Amino acid sequence: MERIAVFPGSFDPFTVGHEAIVRRALNMFDKVVIAIGYNSAKSGFFSLEKRIKWIETVFADESKVTVDSYTGLTVDYCKEINAQYLLRGLRTAADFEYERAIAQVNKQMNNDIESVFLLTSPEHTPVNSTIVRDVIRHGGDASMFLPKGLNISVDDIE
C-alpha cells in the first residue's frame, strides 16, 4: 500500500520551515500532499490560488509532492484521498500541546490515521507565517524566511 501523508495548513505564506518538514518527510512517505485547508478562524492574507502556485513552484522538481486544497475536517480529507498519515512540524512546546490535542481527537474520529510529528530544525524555530506576513505587510525583505525562488511582496496581498 502506498504511504500517503497529508501536510495540512493554511500556508499563508509557505515558509522555509514548512519546506524543510516536507523535504525531510519525503524519505518516509511515498507521497506527501500539501493540503491547504480552509480555517474559519483565519482570514487568508494571500489568495488560495497564489499559495497553491507558490508551493507548486517550490516542489516543481519533486514528483512525490502534490498540492491541494480542502474544506471540512482534515481526517475526512485524509479518508477521501486514502492517506494514512498526518504530518505536522513542531517548533515549540506550545506547538506540541496544541498538536497533541488535535492528534488525539483525530485518532478518535478515524483510528486509521496516524499523526507524525517532526521537530523543526533549530534555525527555523522562530519562523512562522504570522511573522513572515508582518514582515511582508510592512515592506520588509522576507526572502530569508521563504523558500528559494519565492519572491513574495506587499503587492501580493489580497
Image (cartoon, rainbow, N blue to C red):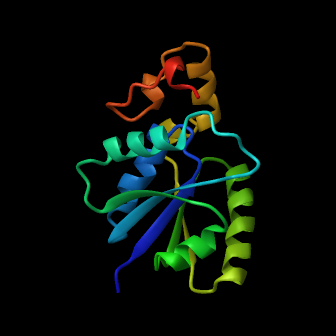
Q: Is residue 44 above or below residue 72?
A: above
How many numbered circles does the render carry? Answer: 0
In the rendered view, would you say 55 is above or below 79?
above
Q: Pinpoint residue 60: horizontal percent, then vertical percent.
A: 27, 47
On screen, residue 115 versus residue 27, left or right, reads: right
Residue 95 vs residue 135, the one in the foreground: 135
Residue at image location 40% in from the left, 64% down from the top:
32
Left or right, 97 with respect to 76, comes to: right
**Residue displayed at 54% across by 44% down:** 11
- Residue pushed farthest top? 139
Instruction: Please name the residue shown 73% across and 57% down the image.
Output: 98
Quarter of the rendering occupied by the N terminus: bottom left
Direction from residue 72 to residue 17 in the image, left or right: left
* Residue 24 image offset from top left, x and y in percent: 38, 56
Q: Is residue 55 above or below residue 149?
A: below
Q: Is residue 19 above or below residue 143?
A: below
Residue occupying image coordinates x 53% and y 44%: 48
Comparing 105 with 89, the one in front is: 105
